[in-house]
Amino acid sequence: MKRDMPVPQAVVYVLLALTFLVLTTLSNTALKHLRLDLTENSIYTLSDNTLKIIEGIDQPINLYLFFSETVSRDYSPLRKYHTQVRELLEEYVFHSEGNIQLHLVDPEPFSEDEDRATGFGLQKVPVQNSGDSLYFGLAGTNAVGNIEAIPFLQTSREVFLEYDIGKLLYSLLNPKKPVLGLMTDLPMYPTGLGSPIGNPDRAWVIIEQLEQLFTVKLVFTDSDRVDDDVDLLMVAHPQRLEEQTLYAIDQYVMGGGKAVFFVDPHAEVQEIPVPADTPLPAADIRSSSLNRLFNAWGFGVSEGTVVADFDHALQAAAPGHAPRRHIVLLGYRQANMNQDDAITAMLGQVNFASASNIEVTDTEKIRMTPLVQSGFNSMLMPLQRLRFVADQAALERGFVASGREYTIAAKIEGELTSAFDGPPPPPKEEEGDGEDGESAADNEEEKPAEKPQYPHIAQTTGAANLLVVADVDVLSDRMWVTVREFLGQRIQQPHANNRDFIVNAVDQYTGGSELIGIRGRARLSRPFTRVIELERKSSLEYRETEENLQRKLRETEQKLSELQSRRADVKSTILTAEQQQELAGFRAQMLQTRKELREVKHKLARDIDALGARLTAINIGAVPAAVTLLALLFAFIRHRRRSRHEA
């Protein structure tokens, strides 16, 4: 029997090359839409909520990513972040099915591109020692020419990059100013808005700030329905609401409306004098509660108690006493605020007064995401101690830490059940004679037409989105801003971030359910310790060179002063030959030193680029080479075994 002739090696190599070309061509065509994100935290995979925003795009959207390539050549971390932003935006383009177009723009100085960046409202940042300015911003336009922009893409907001881009897209798709429905009995707004309880002087500063960004519409506390045009309902300090109004709030939420609630066990801003001998009622005269609704929805806010926090107390002065810490006037910083949520992540401090605690009772249906929590050295203090003890030291003597955190502000999500079985009966009208002695029966024909009946909604369809804050003083001016009159104008000097907390919340909740659901992501950039060490070393060298320059400058100025003092004509401004020579030497020295400074920065950039090239070579070359060596080793071992078997 004739043995098979072996195939020549050249033919094998040709067949392998042809197979490689065919597979490459097929992969470029059949698999071009396939994405595989192998990063540790899937940083290039868009969230489901972002994909919903992209799916809702029904018009062409143009995104313009401005980045100063030349000016940024010595800033490797920023260039790396720009690359990652661009690659993430390319994912938006990929999923948009042609509705999003990405334009990469390098705004050279004095160019039309720079004029366009300025027209979009982008911010340019001066670069140290060069006199140049750097652009790194994102702008977008929709089909009708509306513009939205992120003035500068700060690396500090890296974890919220997807949220910021999603907010930009949502604003382009919904250019109309969102409507904020405000329901409150507090004098937060001027009387000109139509309510007799408004502030006759000025609106609260927080209302002025909200009116700049949103359309604020009053919803009266005796309303029996919330209008359909309200994008977000804000209920602040609701006291003794009628059943019809509670039902209106309930049905607004059941119908998918988003709401922000501010309830308070003891509103310090509500200036109601309470005599010392007044017995404590079941509910404090300054308290507000919506537990009639909250408890049916699966959570509640503690009544009759306030959060006392020993470690986060603010300074306050009682009448006749020196300023000292007040354990129910609380200032919380980043350690007590949720750093994974865009509402609170970038805030410095938010102040509260006599706040309460939020707790979930139905853990199966309700998910609570705390935004602000107390420290562990805190307690729930009975309200009567706060009412009858004016001395802050006496409050501290009754303080016993519970060792647990209390939630002062939180997001509430879940499927809610209505607090009502159906519409409540209408309020009974007072019986009696009408004008001119006519009875009510005689005036039946003058009664207004009956309002239309709306079907009762027993449960939310999908998850509801609520924000609950167990304090209303957080809105008041005295907790976060000082207002002064100067030349007929109001000068506002914030001393806390309460305004940012409220505006961030309203901004997020008027941005749609998809935007609320976008969480903070893992950082795109990972720290390279070698690069950080290079930057630190260069920074030390740069600082030393700069200090030497400053020292030479001082020495030269001192020498010039000495030369000037020895001159006979001290009033003359003409420099002597010696001074001119000294100045010329100094100028040459300045130019040389500046050249050295530039060389230090260029050397740092070259070292980082070289390190990046080595890492790229390892990733692209070394890893495949290692796999190839393993394959060859495996083939060699297999060949040896086959040879032994044939032998």
Image (cartoon, rainbow, N blue to C red):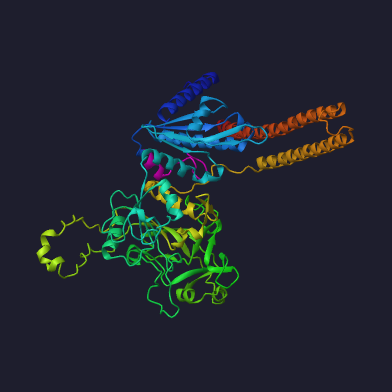
Q: Where is residue 631 shown, x and y percent of the image?
A: 57, 33
Instruction: Name the side, left or right, on which 225 lies relative to 597.
Output: left
Instruction: Name the side, left or right, on which 32 lies relative to 618.
Output: left
Q: Where is residue 437 shown, x and y percent of the image?
A: 13, 69
**Image vertical order of residue 199 relative to residue 542, above or below:** below
**Image vertical order of residue 107 relative to residue 246, above or below:** above
Q: Is residue 99 magenta?
A: no
Nearest the eye: 290 or 435:
435
Q: Where is residue 238 shown, x and y percent of the image?
A: 36, 63
Q: Quadrant of residue 614?
A: top right
Q: Where is residue 120 shown, x and y percent of the image?
A: 47, 33
Instruction: Name the side, left or right, on which 1 lies relative to 551.
Output: left
Instruction: Name the side, left or right, on which 426 lies relative to 322.
Output: left
- The residue under the point 46% across, 43% down is 164
- The residue under the point 44% across, 34% down is 140
Q: Is residue 41 magenta?
A: yes
User: Which secondary structure is most common in the magenta stretch?
Assistant: loop
Nearest the eye: 288 or 173:
288
Nearest the eye: 443 or 248:
443
Query: Quadrant of the image for the C terminus?
Result: top right
Q: Which residues are magenta?
A: 37-54
**Residue 285 in view here:** yes
